């Protein structure tokens, strides 16, 4: 099994519930699958080029405007290849302003590529990624249930983006309610870690 970890949090793991949940999941997964090949992209430490005025035309197939744009386009292709090679993609992300940190969006903008991960047909868009699974390890200050559920635009965004390219088997592990701090936050993280261990055993 090939596993891609996508870490989208600039914090250190000891200060991050989402990273701790991800670590627990991946550690448990390695126990079940000692032969798993795990690679990591840390979108706050590894380069994920932003689609700017020069890179955008190259992303859509135009000749790169200069050497730097060509290099960035090469980096984008390497990120896409890494994603395509994985059987399982584990994303660790905090909720920031009800959504994802911007570098996770930059990663998503790199892997949603017409002709590679989706295509348009006469009957609408079709995902080209088959057989890949995803696990979302998330943490938020609040708890998004009941009347507050609609404020969580992170979970539906990631599910929509992954589903669009054909990744529909998505497991969500959430350490919500970190804003309370103290014992409540610790209990939420501990519960999500237990869920992560149980989820890992099923892969
Ligand atoms: C810039 C920023 C924006 C945040 N926005 C929200 C938010 O909209 N809703 C929420 O519930 N928590 C929000 N939080 C709190 C984080 O989601 C919370 O601290 C969570 O534990 C972060 O995950 P981590 O522990 O893995 O870093 C925000 C935190 C930061 C730093």
Image (cartoon, rainbow, N blue to C red):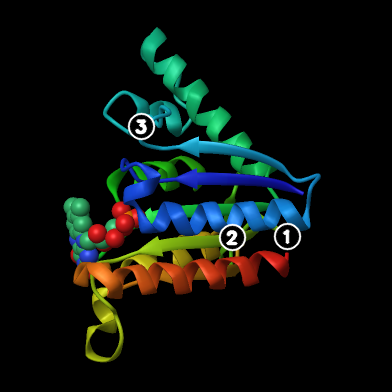
- Relative to 151, say whether 95 is above or below: above
Residue 75: % across, % down: 49, 24
Tell me whether circle 3 and circle 1 mark residues in contact (CB < 8 Å): no
Residue at (47, 61) in percent of width and height: 137
Determine crowd level at label 1: few under 14, some 14-19, many 20+ residues with C-alpha closer than 10 A: few
Q: Is residue 129 left or right of residue 106?
A: right
Residue at (66, 64) in percent of width and height: 200
Determine crowd level at label 2: few under 14, some 14-19, many 20+ residues with C-alpha closer than 10 A: many
Q: Is residue 29 left or right of residue 16?
A: right
Tag 3 residue:
56
- Foreground pick, 184 / 43: 184
Q: Is residue 17 something that shows in the picture?
A: yes
Q: Is residue 128 something that shows in the picture?
A: no
Frontmost of labels 3 and 2 is 2
Label 2 sits on a secondary structure element that is: strand
Tag 2 residue:
134
User: Any mark on residue 170, and which?
Assistant: none
Residue at the extreme bottom: 146
Residue 143: % across, % down: 28, 78
Q: CA distance from mark 2 to mark 1?
A: 10 Å
Residue at (55, 38) in percent of width and height: 40
Tag 1 residue:
131
Residue at (45, 66) in percent of width and height: 160
- Foreground pick, 76 / 62: 76
- Relative to 51, say whether 164 is above or below: below
Q: CA distance from mark 3 to mark 2?
A: 27 Å
Residue 3: % across, % down: 66, 47
Frontmost of labels 3 and 1 is 1
Q: Is residue 42 left or right of residue 96?
A: right
């Amino acid at each position: 099994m090939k596993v891609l970890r996508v870490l989208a949090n600039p914090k250190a793991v000891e200060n991050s519930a989402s990273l701790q949940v991800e670590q627990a999941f991946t550690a448990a997964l390695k126990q079940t699958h000692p032969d798993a090949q795990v690679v990591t992209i840390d979108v706050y430490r590894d380069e994920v080029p932003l689609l700017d005025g020069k890179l955008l035309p190259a992303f859509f197939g135009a000749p790169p405007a200069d050497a730097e744009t060509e290099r960035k386009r090469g980096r984008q292709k390497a990120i896409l290849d890494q994603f395509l090679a994985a059987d399982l993609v584990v994303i660790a992300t905090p909720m920031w302003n009800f959504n994802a940190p911007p570098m996770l969006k930059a990663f998503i903008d790199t892997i949603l590529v017409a002709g590679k991960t989706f295509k348009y047909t006469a009957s609408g868009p079709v995902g080209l990624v088959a057989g890949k699974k995803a696990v979302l390890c998330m943490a938020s200050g609040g708890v998004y249930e009941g009347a507050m559920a609609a404020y969580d635009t992170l979970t539906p965004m990631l599910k929509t983006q992954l589903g669009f390219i054909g990744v529909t088997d998505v497991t969500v592990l959430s350490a919500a309610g970190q804003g309370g701090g103290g014992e409540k936050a610790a209990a939420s993280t501990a519960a999500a870690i237990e869920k992560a261990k149980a989820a890992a055993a099923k892969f």
